[in-house]
Amino acid sequence: MLHETHEARPVETLTRVPYWVFQTAETYRQEQERIFQGPSWHYLALEVELPGPGDFRTTRIGDTPVVVTRDNDGEIYAFENRCAHRGALICLDSHGKGKKDFSCVYHAWTYDRQGNLRGIAFKDGVKGKGGMPDSFRMEDHGPRKLRIAILHGLIFGSFSEEVPPIEEYLGDEISSRIERVLGGRKPVVLGRVTQVLPNNWKLYMENVKDSYHASILHLFFTTFELNRLSQKGAIIVDESGGHHVSYSAIDTSAQKDVEYAKQQLRSESQYKLADPSLLQGFDEYHDGVTLQILSVFPTFVLQQIQNAIAVRQIVPRAIDKTDLNWTYLGFADDTPEQRLTRLKQNNLVGPAGYISMEDGCVGGFVQRGIAGASEQEAILEMGGSGAQSSESRVTEASVRGFWKAYRSQMGM
Amino acid sequence: MTDSVYQMIARAQAEYARCIDDDRLEDWPDHFHGSCVYKITTAANHREGLEGAIIFANSKGMLRDRVSALRDANIYERQSYRHILGQPSILHESGGEVRSETSFLVARIVQDGDTDIFATGRYLDLYKIEQGKVRLNERIVVCDSSRIDTLMALPL
């Protein structure tokens, strides 16, 4: 059930989330204004996707279409994909190379690679008649330009002048965990796919930050000891609450898992692989960490699951519809064997992923479950009521962190 | 000869589709040779030569694992497919190896609910005919769209 509005009432604790935040048009509208066009950084593309001048990709920040380009000066630029004239898309293609300029198909208003209006068809009229008035100055008109920040090859953009520099926005701990995966390396895009989720975007972000569910919902993960809550690992939540890292490492001295047996979870079944080469990875980071899920508020995820590396961009499309854009990565110096390992391990993630397909449907289960329960609230008390880093992953601290940052930006 | 190869491929395709649509997934890997490649990708990735896939298997064991994961591990709403296949185009044929391309449309029925078009695309196949048996050495499933609704559980 989707509603137009809901009378907001203050909620004083991070341990409760009223269901109307996933349901109302008013909330969706405010998010566009306060979060997607507000003081946040939004992932746009990878630097390696735009290697040369005039290379471009189109994407979205929330509802707003955006063009990302590289100009002759080697710098990355991004601007709204909206003609200053009558609002049509300036660029229709999803990506391209070596484009000199961007010309709107409607009336051929033309923009350079930085989004500056450079030409107007029949600006001076025809045979001295018609045309734009002399008072019209092209430099006063154009699509909104974005601020750009690049971190270890990830391009982020923001409509806000107030958003702090990306390093400050993320804090040292989160930045260093991005560096761990991507620092000093040249990524290679192995493939892309979009998973269309039947739920509000925040339900996916909650899921990403929810270390509590991982080994319960995802049997595949748990059975093969890719991730158990009793494994060595931790949660890092930054000061704002909005960014997090959940990581785990194989603990070779681990005892037989009595905790899991006690809970009688599905994850104790005897499931064995016919071809275990799927899980035979290589030691890429030399720190024993086999899983690191990192999120940047509001809608970016960097994933390392063994040797399956991916970035995920979350784009809300409607109150109850969300695009999850997967970009699978390898690195330029991969050996053929390492590349094959990544291709195999990509079976773990994406729309058909052994450990991620459930995440595609569980948000929809919530969206459907809460229909008719706008006044009710979700409970987030696992691991207390705070949003701090934690050595235990049996916690919802990073989910509470998301709501802390969300409330702050929404002015709730 | 060409006629008979065509008929053999067409029959194999029909059996493959029935196997999935009838929920006999345990029989699905038997449509492949022991050493095989099965891959589901998008037209955009295929066009750009990107090797990453939505599903990738290079052994019959990996296909069996996909089935046991679907049966025993993964959580998804009960669903079924209906494959509608086009006529196979035989692209190349030599020494018992046949390259063919076949278009498909797959409708998905979730629970007992709506029937939606889940995927359209083409199978790029390499069949090997041995002792009158037609099996796949390679099937690249190229989906026309890059957008997958909710999740992809059953194979295409």
Image (tube, rainbow, N blue to C red):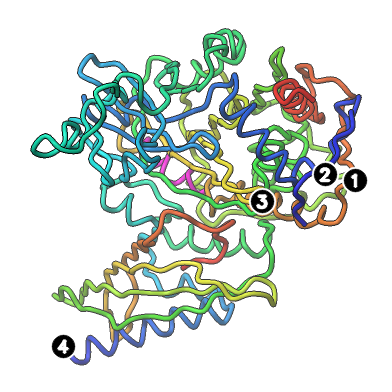
- Residue beneath label 2, please? A19
Mark in front: 4 vs 2? 2
Q: Residue at x 84, y 36 (%)?
A: A17
The reply to whether the magenta stretch includes residue A346 is yes
Tag 1 secondary structure = loop
- Return the residue nearer the eye: B46 or A149: A149
Q: Amino acid at mark 1?
A: Glu
Q: CA distance from mark 2 to mark 1?
A: 7 Å
In the rendering, at what x and y percent does residue A237 appear?
Answer: 71, 18
Residue where numbered disc 1 is placed: A375
Q: Which residue is mark 3?
A: A320
**Label 3 crowd bin: few (<14), some (14–19), many (20+), radius 10 Å:** many
Q: Residue furthest front?
A: A129
Residue A334, given in percent of the width and then of the height, sits at: 33, 30
Residue B35 is at least partly visible in this image: no
Magenta region: A338-347
Q: Is there one chain holding both mark 4 and mark 3?
A: no
Q: Are marks 4 and 2 on the same chain?
A: no
Which residue corresponds to the image point at 82% horizontal and 44% vertical from the top-left? A19
Our reading of the magenta stretch's main secondary structure is helix
* Residue B128 horizontal side relative to residue A197, left or right: left
Amino acid residing under circle 2: Tyr
